[in-house]
Image: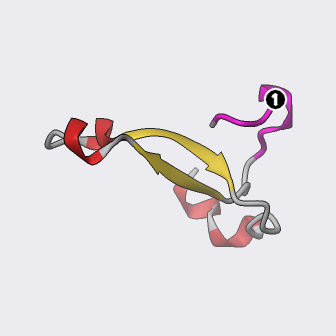
Amino acid sequence: VSDIDANEVRMGMRVKAVWRPREEWGLGIDNIEFFRPTGEPDADYDTYKQHL
């Protein structure tokens, strides 16, 4: 997660992908350059606890 201090990252934080330029795309997840916080309220723990 970029555009935020590491000590501010938390579970449930909503983020969105920031994509590399289309001409740099390959076939994998590395097409995503990084994730940035959306500013939306955090997801409720019950919505992601089964993934932990």
Check disc 1: other Cα within 10 Å, few if <14, some if 14-19, many if 20+.
few
Q: Is residue 41 left or right of residue 43?
A: right
Quadrant in which residue 25 is drawn: top left
- SS at mark 1 in the image: loop
Residue 6 part of the magenta segment: yes
Residue 13 spot, x, y in % from top left: 73, 54
Q: State the predominant SS element of the stretch in magenta.
A: loop
- Above or below residue 46? Residue 21 is above
Residue 4 spot, x, y in % from top left: 77, 35
> Residue visible at 73% across and 67% down?
43
Residue nearest the viewer, comparing 28 with 19: 19
| Mark 1: amino acid | Asp
Quadrant in which residue 12 is drawn: bottom right
Q: Which residues are magenta?
A: 2-10
Residue nearest the viewer, comparing 19 with 6: 19
Q: Is residue 14 left or right of residue 31?
A: right
Q: Is residue 20 left or right of residue 27?
A: right
Residue identified by numbered label 1: 5
